[in-house]
Image (cartoon, rainbow, N blue to C red):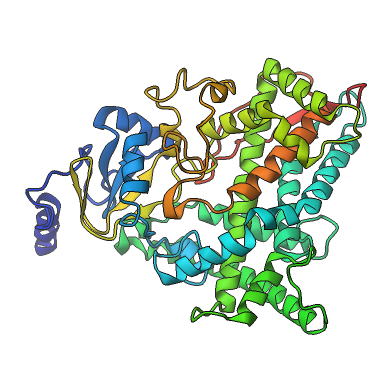
Amino acid sequence: MVHLFIIFLFKWFFKPASTAGKRLPPSPPNLPVIGNLHQLGLYPHRALQALSKRYGPLMMLHLGSVPTVIVSSADTAREIMKTQDLIFSNRPKVSIPDKIVYGSKDIAFAPYGEHWRQVRSICVLHLLSNKRVQSFRYIREEETDLLIQKIRQSSSSSTSVTNLSDLLVSLTNGTICRVALGRKYSDGEAEGSTKFELMLKEIMELSATFNAGDFIPWLKWMNKVNGLDARVDKVAKSFDEFLSGVVEDHRNRKQGNTDTDDSRNDADLVDLLLEIQRENKSSFVLDDEAIKGVIFDMFGAGTDTTYTSLEWTVAEVLKHPEIMKKLQNEVRQVVGSKIEVEEEDLEKMPYLKAVMKESLRLHPPIPMLVPRESTQDSKVMGYHIAAGTQVIINAWAIARDPMQWENPEEFNPERFFKNSVVDFKGFNFEYIPFGAGRRGCPGITFAMAVNEFALAKLVRNFDFALPIGVKEWDMTEAVGSTVHKKNPLLVIASTPPSC
C-alpha cells in the first residue's frame, strides 16, 4: 500500500518528460485522480466560459487522466479548425458511441483516416448535396403540412394547450425516417413505432451519460456495477437488429425491382448507400456496418440537433413579441394571396434567415461541438500542445464573446443585417454552431431546409400565446451534450383571420 501511494505521488507531482520545460496553456488547480472534472458542473459550456474569463481563451484542464485544451475565442478556434486543422482532425475514442456505432465506423466519431475520408465523401457528394437535399423537398412539405394539421387538431378551443415540443420532435423524426429509411418508424400508428421511439430516446440519454471510465480508465469496472455497460450493450444490439432489418428489406426490395436507377425521386439514403456498395468503383469497401453507421449519424445529427435548434428558435421568437410580429409580417407579405408557403419563398425572407442565425448563435445545439484530438505535438498561440491532447471548442462561449458581438446576451436578429457576411458554414470563426474545417457538420443544408421551412409555415398559419396562468416563457436549459429546453414548449395556437 505504501508503494502504491509513493507511485501515485510521483505521477501526480512530476510532469512527464515530454512536457517538462515547455510552455503549457494556463490551467486552474486540479485535484488528485479527478483533475478538473469537478469544475464542469451540470452545464459545462457555462462553467468553461467562466473559467476562460480567468485563465484565458486557451486553457488546459485535466479531465481525470485526459489532458484537455479548452478553446473559447474566435482566433484560437481559427488556429485549431483552419490553420492546423489537419493536426486536430482526429476524434478521441468515446466508449459509448464507439460500442453503438460498430467501433466508430460512422462519420461523427470515426478517427481521422482513410475510412473517415471515404465515408464523409460519400455523404457530401451523394447523400447531402444541394441536389439531393432538393430531391427530398416533397417529404419536407408533406411532413410540415402534417405538423400544421396536428397543431390545428390540438387547438380545438381558445384555451387548448398544444405541446409544440412534441410536435417538432415528430416533424424531424418523421422527415428523417422517410429520407433515410423510406418510411416512418416514428409515427404513433406505424408498426413498431413505440419501440423505435423508445430506442432512440435511450440512445440519446446514453450519449449524454457521463462515463467515468473514459476519463479515469481504472474506474471502468464501475460500469458493470451500475449497469451502464448492460444498458449500452442492450441498446446497441437492438439498434443493430433494427438497422440490419432495414438494410435487408431494402436489399430484397431492390432485387425484386427492375428499376436500377436509385437517383429517382423515391430513393432513400439506404437505397443510395446500397447502390454505392454494389457499384464498388474504388478500393474502399463500404460494408454493411459502415452503411449502418452512416444511417445512425443521420438520426443522431438529423433528429436531435435539428429539433433542438428549431425548438429554441420558436421559443425565442415567442418570447419577443416584436420579433414575432416582424417575422409574421415578412412571411405573410411574401406569401401574399397564395394558399401556403413554398420553399422558393424562403429566399425572399431575409428576416426569417436572420432569426434562424441569431437562434443558432445563442443556442448552438451542441454547445461544445464534438471533441477533437491532436495527432502530433504542435504550438497553438505560443503554447505547447502534446500529441493525444483532447480539444474542446466552446462554440457557445465564442458566440457570446463581447469582443466579437455587441450585447451578446440579447436576441437580436438585426445584428445579421449589419454583419451580413457572417454565416454558419464554417468560414467565420466567431460563429460556428455547426463546427468548421474537416470535421464540420456535412448536413447544414439539410438541417436549415427543414428548419427554415417549418418556421415559415408556423408563423404563417398561427398566432401563439402563453397558456392561461403562465406569465412568461420558460427558457431553462436541460442537461446533456445536446442542450434542449428543459421543459416542453406549451402554447395556445390560434389561426389568424387571414389564414
Residue drawn at x 63%, y 28% is: 355
Whether residue 38 is visible here, answered yes or no, is: no
Whether 310 is drawn above or below 143: the answer is above
419 vs 337, left or right, is left
Q: Position of residue 173 (x, y in %)?
A: 71, 52
211 vs 325, left or right, is left
Q: Which of these two is toward me, 354 or 491?
A: 354
Residue drawn at x 57%, y 59% is: 124
Numbered label tally:
0
10 vs 35, left or right, is left
Q: Which of these two is toward me, 496 or 89?
A: 89
Whether 1 is drawn above or below 58: the answer is below
Give the residue at the far left of this rendering. Answer: 21
Question: Looking at the rendering, which quadrant does residue 460 occupy?
Answer: top right
Q: Position of residue 378 (x, y in %)?
A: 21, 52
Q: Position of residue 5 (x, y in %)?
A: 13, 58
Q: Quadrant of the N terminus?
A: bottom left
Whether residue 405 is visible here, answered yes or no, is: yes
Question: Looking at the rendering, which quadrant does residue 461 occupy?
Answer: top right
Q: Quadrant of the C terminus?
A: top right
Residue drawn at x 35%, y 41% is: 78
Q: Position of residue 365 (x, y in %)?
A: 55, 41
460 vs 419, left or right, is right
